[in-house]
């Protein structure tokens, strides 16, 4: 099997279709394009999500905190706690393990998230560090959170720029392949992108905008300013757009000409032969909104840039993308992330 996330078809046939029926305590469980599970806990709802870091190398602790906390934030909820599992290869050192723990502790402290447990072991089942994090947050029932789906006519918005995480990993783990091909200042810039990888701020800013603004939609949820948010991870911007549309049972048109990148990220992708639209992009949050101007203004007020990069359409339109040449093409289903092409 190829390296990376399972395809949507594999995920459905090998995993999702084999899971047991959910109990009445679970409002929302596993699904393609679903960032989190929602569980009833008395008068509150528990929101939780797990993610592995397999390509983070020496910065796995930094990334592990953010990828799971970003999922919680994509639900408009502030993460409050996290579990960390560290599986180290036999040739690892004590210093490497403590470094990963120190990274995770530093980033959790910045977010105000408690590391409440987990597991650490050395195993010959892995040849590099694997760090798995499970984050959770709690929200009162009835709070304005984007539990719905994108609707035809919603604009597709992205925060910050694409390819943030991929650039960070490339600069920290593959600098030898960039030397002489990418300006030194770009390599150093990308190494600082850990400061951009969290979307907790924008997610919690937009959560309150998911309040009811009209009649209930066909799926039972209120039509909102923010209908759906999605953290951009493996598969990049294209993969996230496809997953949002698939989850919502609508079509989508992504305009690649509008997707923002830093010059640093573009230079790194060019040097390594990576497709920036399909490169892991934690740090960017994608939003389906019926009021894009309101969303962009709310984020701008807090110093966060946001850009409209497409629109959701009727399901009959399918998933499409407008290339840099202005030609409309079908958008392929998510495949292995570009980061795995780096040898």
Image (tube, rainbow, N blue to C red):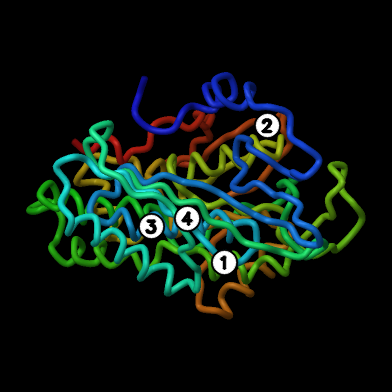
Q: Earlier in the sequence, mark 3 or mark 2?
A: 3
Looking at the picture, how far across and down is residue 25, in whole percent? Answer: 77, 45
- To which residue does mark 2 refer? 317
Kindly indicate the quadrant of the structure image that contains residue 245.
top right
Q: Earlier in the sequence, mark 4 or mark 3?
A: 4
Under tag 2, what secondary structure?
helix
- Choose mark 1 or mark 3, whichever is in front: 1
Total residue callouts:
4
Residue at screen point 46% across, 50% down: 257
Residue at screen point 14% across, 51% down: 178
- To which residue does mark 3 refer? 261
Quote the CA–CA distance across marks 4 and 3. Answer: 32 Å
Looking at the picture, how far across and down is residue 114, in whole percent? Answer: 49, 68
Quote the CA–CA distance across marks 1 and 3. Answer: 31 Å
Residue 95 lies left or right of residue 126; in this view the side is left
Under tag 4, what secondary structure?
strand
Q: Earlier in the sequence, mark 2 or mark 1?
A: 1
- To which residue does mark 1 refer? 80
Quote the CA–CA distance across marks 4 and 1. Answer: 11 Å
Quote the CA–CA distance across marks 3 and 2. Answer: 27 Å
- To which residue does mark 4 refer? 83
Q: Nearer the viewer, residue 104 or 223?
A: 104
- Choose mark 2 or mark 1, whichever is in front: 1
Under tag 3, what secondary structure?
loop
Q: Earlier in the sequence, mark 2 or mark 4?
A: 4
- Choose mark 2 or mark 4, whichever is in front: 4
Quote the CA–CA distance across marks 2 and 4. Answer: 41 Å
């Amino acid at each position: 099997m190829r390296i990376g996330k399972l395809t949507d078809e594999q995920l459905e046939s090998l995993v999702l279709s084999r899971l047991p029926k959910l109990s009445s305590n679970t409002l929302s469980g596993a699904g393609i394009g679903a960032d989190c599970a929602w569980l009833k806990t008395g008068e509150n709802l528990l929101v939780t999500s797990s993610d592995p870091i397999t390509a983070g190398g020496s910065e796995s602790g930094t990334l592990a905190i953010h990828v799971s906390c970003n999922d919680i934030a994509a639900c408009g909820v502030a993460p409050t706690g996290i579990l960390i599992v560290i599986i180290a290869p036999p040739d690892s050192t004590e210093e490497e393990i403590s470094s990963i723990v120190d990274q995770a502790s530093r980033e959790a402290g910045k977010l105000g998230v408690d590391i409440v447990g987990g597991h650490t072991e050395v195993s010959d089942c892995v040849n590099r560090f694997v760090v798995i994090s499970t984050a959770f947050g709690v929200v009162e029932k009835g709070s304005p959170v984007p539990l719905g789906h994108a609707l035809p006519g919603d604009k597709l918005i992205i925060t910050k720029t694409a390819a943030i995480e991929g650039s960070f990993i490339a600069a920290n783990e593959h600098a030898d392949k960039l030397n002489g091909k990418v300006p030194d200042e770009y390599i150093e810039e990308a190494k600082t992108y850990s400061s951009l990888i969290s979307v907790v701020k924008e997610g919690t800013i937009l959560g309150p905008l998911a309040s009811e603004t009209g009649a209930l939609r066909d799926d039972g949820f209120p039509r909102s300013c923010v209908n759906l948010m999605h953290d951009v991870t493996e598969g990049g911007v294209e993969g996230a757009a496809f997953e949002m549309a698939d989850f919502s049972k609508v079509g989508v048109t992504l305009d690649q000409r509008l997707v923002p990148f830093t010059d640093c990220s573009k230079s790194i992708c060019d040097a390594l032969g990576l497709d920036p639209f399909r490169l892991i992009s934690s740090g960017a949050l994608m939003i389906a909104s019926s009021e894009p101007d309101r969303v962009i203004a709310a984020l701008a007020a807090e110093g966060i840039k946001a850009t409209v990069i497409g629109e959701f359409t009727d399901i009959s339109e399918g998933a499409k993308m407008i290339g840099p040449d202005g030609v409309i093409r079908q958008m392929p289903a998510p495949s292995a992330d570009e980061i795995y092409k780096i040898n």
